[in-house]
Image (spheres, helix red, strand yellow):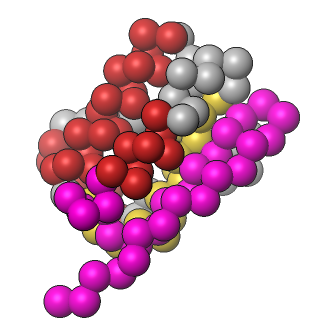
Amino acid sequence: MSAEKFQVDQEELEKSIQLRISGELDLAAALTFRHALEAVVHRADKALILDVEQLRYIDSTGIGIVVSALKIRDELKAPFTVRNIPAGIKRLFDLTGISGFLNEGIEGSA
């Protein structure tokens, strides 16, 4: 199985910070993802948008990082949106029970 390289792209807009993740988010990529999120998760002055349209795989480590970010943003009462969730990833979020806690954004919300 050839792993698709994991990548995080960040864009700061007037009212939001968008992180676009792509590839496979597994144990090997977890540190990269965690560092990218930690750099912005406490920024309560802006909405945080996680765009996962190009995410091909996520394991329990990646899900744990998303859950940690959800908790922090909730404590800060700061918006956190996960958008463009592929069907396979959505099923996994449903199975793990975190879908009910995700604010699933509509394309174009910023």
Is residue 15 within the magenta segment?
Answer: yes
Q: Can see residue 32?
A: yes
For the C terminus, the quadrant is top right
Percent across and percent down for residue 106 are 62, 47
Is residue 29 within the magenta segment?
Answer: yes
Q: Residue drawn 23% across and 39% down? A: 64
**Residue 98, quarter of picture:** top left
Left or right: 26, with 81 as reference point? left
Which range is magenta?
1-30
**Residue 105, quarter of picture:** top right
Identify whether 45 is placed above or below 1. above
Percent across and percent down for residue 65 are 30, 40
Q: Residue drawn 50% across and 45% down? A: 36
Q: Can see residue 80?
A: no
Q: From this viewpoint, which residue is outermost toward the bottom?
A: 1
Left or right: 1, with 83 as reference point? left
**Residue 49, quarter of picture:** top right
Q: Residue drawn 41% across and 19% down? A: 72
Q: Residue drawn 62% across and 23% down? A: 43
